[in-house]
Image (cartoon, helix red, strand yellow):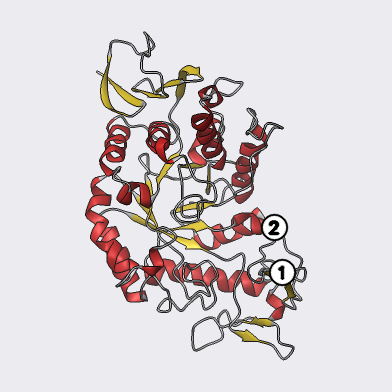
Amino acid sequence: MSPLLHHHPPNNDSFTNIVSGFNWESSKKKGGWYNFLIKSIPEIAASGITHVWLPPPSHSASSEGYLPGRLYDLDASQYGTQDELKTLIKEFHSNGIQCVADIVINHRTAERQDSDGRWNIFEGGTPDDRLDWDHSCICIDDITKSGDTTTNSGGTGNPDTGADFNGAPDIDHLNTRVQRELSDWMNWLKTEIGFDGWRFDFARGYSPDITKLYMGNTRPDFAVGEIWNPLSYGSDGKPNYDQDGHRRELMEWVKAVGGSATAFDFTTKGILQAALVEGELWRLKDSNGGPPGMIGLMPENAVTFVDNHDTGSTQKRWPFPSDKVMQGYVYILTHPGIPSIFYDHFFDWGLKEEISNLTMIRIRNGIKASSIVRILASDPDLYVAAIDDKIIAKIGTRYDVGNVVPTTFKIATSGNNYAVWEKQ
């Protein structure tokens, strides 16, 4: 993808379907997660998945990988060794599936303390000095919190360009050495390890200009940013009907990054689960008559999802209601945007067949990120929408859809409070 002067959709495959290839407990798997996941590749490929999002690959102070230290040291990962990871990626590639690395570069854990006892001496994980940083590569306004204890890591770099992360020193991404060496590391992940794209963790921790720089330096086939900010809420404790500001924030980030990256559609997740929990499916139609999430404004750059390792899994920081998960998948797998399936739902919840039915319907009818939605009903207990006038999706507790679905459409799949029709 060439550098872009204006917004342009990413070069995503028409039928991009992502699966997250891990959860919050995966690093504890006996025998190693990479060795375990490789056995599931045939099932993933048979379900029409095009991309798998893999966990952070480097040495980390936390087993899950989100407090990385020696970035080049992949053998110290709790998920497996560097060779096991390369074997896994090669096997995914042989099944036509691209691999997305979880890139955690907002913050970094130090290898040892300086002479004043501050943790700010970094080790890159190679015999030479690549990524061997010191206090000059930490933001000058960085503070680290552990419980009630607040510590200063002694950073002397530029002020942070984004939100603060309290768990580890925030890295100064305006430092040209940091920019150069992180770009080199990411390109090594592509050329040596085999990764095809990036998922930028905590991407609001540094300015979109920084992400744009790394995108230009590494040219991934696919990239998605995690910009997780809370929805706006009313005095009743429920999300407001109008979440336009929330979704525009995602859209503006994508534009600022250059238009070739995507963003997780947290707006759609929040509205969709609120609508289903409250029995308020009217929330799924915005004031202009379209989808109310990011997919209603910039669908080609919106990655939709029901849950991930943060919102669901054992963390449950913002979980989708478990009894309504399939209705969530009916929505994201029939609608525009780039749908992402959570590992737990696909493999552990017994939903693989139901989810696979939906991915096959999506592929069979050529539904893609830019498909057009026509909302036919948006009542408290019923939501019905036609997508590209090829399929019609229904969710909600009301069984009788009346004459909303034309007789030229036939049931393709159905389940608890959902149905999907295909045009004959």
Q: Nearer the viewer, residue 412 or 274?
A: 274
Q: Could you say whether the residue bearing mark 1 is in a helix, strand or loop?
A: loop
- Where is residue 207, by image quadrant? bottom right
Q: List the residue tagged with mark 1.
A: 148
- Nearer mark to the viewer, of 2 and 1: 1
Disc 2 crowd rating (10 Å Cα; few below 14, some 14-19, many 20+) is some
Q: From the viewer's perspective, is 180 left or right of 365? A: right
Give the residue at x 36% y 73%: 80
Q: Nearer the viewer, residue 379 or 70?
A: 379
Instruction: Give the amino acid type for the residue marked by disc 2 in the picture.
Output: Ala
Residue 132, horizontal then vertical, whole percent = 59, 83
Name the residue furthest top. 403
Give the residue at x 41% y 73%: 78
Q: Mark 2 or mark 1: which comes first in sequence? A: 1
Tell me: residue 11, above or below residue 73.
above
Residue 404, horizontal then vertical, whole percent = 39, 11
Q: Could you say whether the residue bearing mark 2 is in a helix, strand or loop?
A: loop
Give the residue at x 32% y 47%: 349
Q: Is residue 332 visible?
A: no
Residue 381, horizontal then vertical, whole percent = 47, 20
- Where is residue 333, by image quadrant? top left
Q: List the residue tagged with mark 2.
A: 163
Instruction: Give the amino acid type for the residue marked by disc 1 in the picture.
Output: Asp
Q: Is residue 161 visible?
A: yes
Give the residue at x 54% y 30%: 296
Residue 4, horizontal then vertical, whole percent = 57, 48
**Gap between marks 2 and 1, in whole Å?**
20 Å
Tell me: residue 216, above or below residue 357.
below
